[in-house]
Amino acid sequence: MDISAILDKQREYFSSGETRNPNFRLGKLDRLKRAIEENEGDILRALQKDLNKAPFEAYETELGIVLDELRYIRKRLLPWIKPIRVRTPLVHFPSSSFRIPEPYGIVLIMSPWNYPFQLTLAPLIGAIAAGNCSIIKPSNYSPATSQLISRIIRENFEDRYIAVLEGGREVNQTLLNHRFDKIFFTGSTAVGRVVMESAARFLTPVTLELGGKSPCIVHRDCDIGLAARRIAWGKLLNAGQTCVAPDYLLVHGTIRHSLIKAIKGYIIKFYGEDPIS
């Protein structure tokens, strides 16, 4: 797929002004919602194939979040995009001042493998609502979900509006050699630096969601059972592959052993004596 040709088509289409129309944005959000609902079974199967996610967990952590985001944004979109009157500085008297939300233009969405559906579609929903065109680069490490996303987008949207590019690092690097108007990236800090460096050459604004340290603080006056349950759930959800999962605990010494015992108990309750099986 010729990336330069797609970008040229998207820039021409964005310049037409069609994507800025509020009814156009609402219509595309509705189309995306219908497409997701029509493909719900395929989405759950793809997530199980890539990550062995059970249907409930896949809906809880991916599909349900995306549908909720669609409902939330669609309900609030029209008030969000209205011009907002703001105070006018005295030096500009007697003029009036407004803040008018404007789309960026062409958005690049680079998503990870651990939440391959949610972290691809959630930024796309925002891009559509804001009136942008989008190029999506899903992760090569979740091929079934990436292929399904590509099919859903291809069947419901023209590539001059939304396009999906599959592939590995070579495709990532080629994309980053082009100029975009906004980049969403979710992944590691190391790759995030590469994305930021590439974007800086074009002064492209970037939203980075990166992994980091996630301490969990447990004080002696807590409900030990409740804390243990939440820690075990948050840490082990999605096989532990969540960027904000607690990765170490800061625990008051007087409850240390009680908390460890309770966490072990909940791990067994949630996953059994032999979780791998």
Image (cartoon, rainbow, N blue to C red):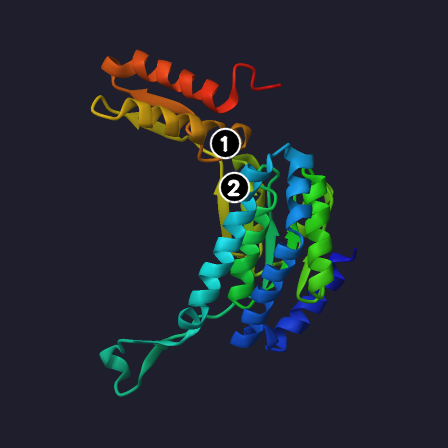
**What is the three-letter code of the residue carrying label 1?**
Leu
* Residue 61 image label: 2
Instruction: Characterize the local packing of mark 1: few (<14), some (14-19) or many (20 or more) Cα atoms within 10 angstroms.
Output: some
Instruction: Kindly tell me whether residue 174 is visible in this rendering.
Output: no
Q: Is residue 221 shown above or below 144?
A: above
Q: Is residue 218 shown above or below 44?
A: above
Q: Position of residue 47 (x, y in %)?
A: 64, 39
Q: Is residue 91 left or right of residue 276?
A: left
Query: Residue at point 26% right, 26% down?
Result: 223
Q: Is residue 220 left or right of residue 196?
A: left
Query: Residue at point 39% right, 76% down?
Result: 83
**What is the three-letter code of the residue carrying label 2?**
Thr
Residue 178: image quadrant is: bottom right
Q: Position of residue 193 (x, y in %)?
A: 54, 40
Q: Quadrant of the N terminus?
A: bottom right
Instruction: Kindly tell me whether residue 217 is visible in this rendering.
Output: yes
> Which residue in the protein does label 1 denote?
237
Q: Secondary structure at mark 1?
A: helix
State yes or no: discs 1 and 2 in contact (Cβ < 8 Å).
Answer: yes
- N-terminal of the pair, mark 1 or mark 2, is 2
Residue 255: image quadrant is: top left
Front residue of 227/132: it is 227
Q: Position of residue 154 (x, y in %)?
A: 73, 59
Q: Is residue 117 shown above or below 73?
A: above
Query: Residue at point 70% right, 67% down?
Result: 160
Q: Quadrant of the C terminus?
A: top right
Q: Secondary structure at mark 2?
A: helix
Q: Position of residue 82 (x, y in %)?
A: 41, 75
Front residue of 136/174: it is 136
* Residue 169 image label: none
Structural distance between the alpha carbons of marks 1 and 2: 9 Å
